[in-house]
Image (spheres, grey):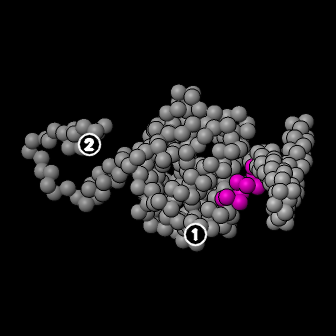
Amino acid sequence: MAIEGGEIVEFPLEKGKEYSNRSESDVDAISDALASHILSPCEKPEIAILIPAYNEELTIGSVVLQARKHARTVIVVNDGSKDKTSEIARAAGAEVIEHIKNEGKAAALRTGFNELKKRDYEFIVMMDGDGQHMMGDIDIIIAPLLEQKADLVIGSRFLKKDNSIPYYRQVGQRILNRMTNVGTSEKVTDTQSGFRAFNRKALDHMDFPSQGYAVEQDMILHCSEKGLRIIEAPISVRYDVPNGHKQNSFRMGVGLLNNIVTTIGYRRPLILFGIPGVVLTIAGLIIGLLTIFEQFFIGSWMLQGLLAGFMVIVGCTLAVSALSLNSLSQLMRMNKST
């Protein structure tokens, strides 16, 4: 009796033949055949799964084994791990690309993107190696690509109500979402999700500069600027995995926020600096007028006058800086296009 395609198949026994005394070698051969059948990759040569990994020896084996059920090729970029991440990933059936030293998640993904550009895959799935993502969600994020509704699909933890996301992460994520969405035409609910799928067109545009964990938000900003279609799909996530966080959440959040401000300052200086500058200038002028009015009727003006002067100076500086940066940004884009 064996399991074939989800159904139980019984093999007829020959009469008069003893089956209870099989040799140990026969048992080993049957076990190896069953294991090979269960773990053999499915026939989906058009899909490749890319996993950046750093010190993930506790989870990378199971992640690769499950990923192989959804794609023929699973590529693990070992980003300078000091444990047995590479050995376990290879034993599970993944192709492993080595970084001699730890260069960060963005560098690991860039290495994977460059390798995949040499191959003929129609769809790419990128996911983390810590076991937080559910393999069953691969079909969910691939579906919009198959239907040609999107070029980049982001798995969103916030579109599914049964995800127990820690409150502090929800607050931090909402701040990062709002800042990132300032620089895009799409409104994304989970800008830091590492579970994504994209087509060949998007893969060819994965040439943007980025560092560390900022790669997810930089990818959104870059793809939006290139006019690629971005949508989200609901996914589940686990937080009870070992070694789930490689960096302090507060430090990582501050670093991501700093990256967003820097990036938007380059891409959308009028929004980041111009609007606050105009608001401060108008507020300063209003306070200045009220100060003049108060001077004539009350006689006290020092504090209001200083405040008004400060706001006008800062506001004008921001507005002029925004115009200058916007002109510089346009010139740089024109130079890139020529």
Q: What residue lies at 55% left-to-right and 32% top-to-bottom?
A: 145
Q: What residue lies at 62% left-to-right and 62% top-to-bottom?
A: 253
Q: What residue lies at 66% left-to-right and 50% top-to-bottom?
A: 179
Q: Nearer the viewer, residue 180 or 312?
A: 312
Q: What residue lies at 67% left-to-right and 63% top-to-bottom?
A: 255
Residue 197 in view (yes/no): no
Find residue 60 and report its horizontal and vertical position in percent. 48, 60
Q: Secondary structure at mark 2?
A: strand
Q: Nearer the viewer, residue 278 or 144?
A: 278
Left/right placement of residue 40 relative to residue 171 reads left
* Mark seen at residue 3: 2
Q: Amino acid at mark 1?
A: Asn
Q: Nearer the viewer, residue 212 or 249?
A: 249
Quarter of the rendering containing residue 231: top right
Q: Which residue is mark 1?
A: 248
Residue 144 in view (yes/no): yes
Q: Amino acid at mark 2?
A: Ile
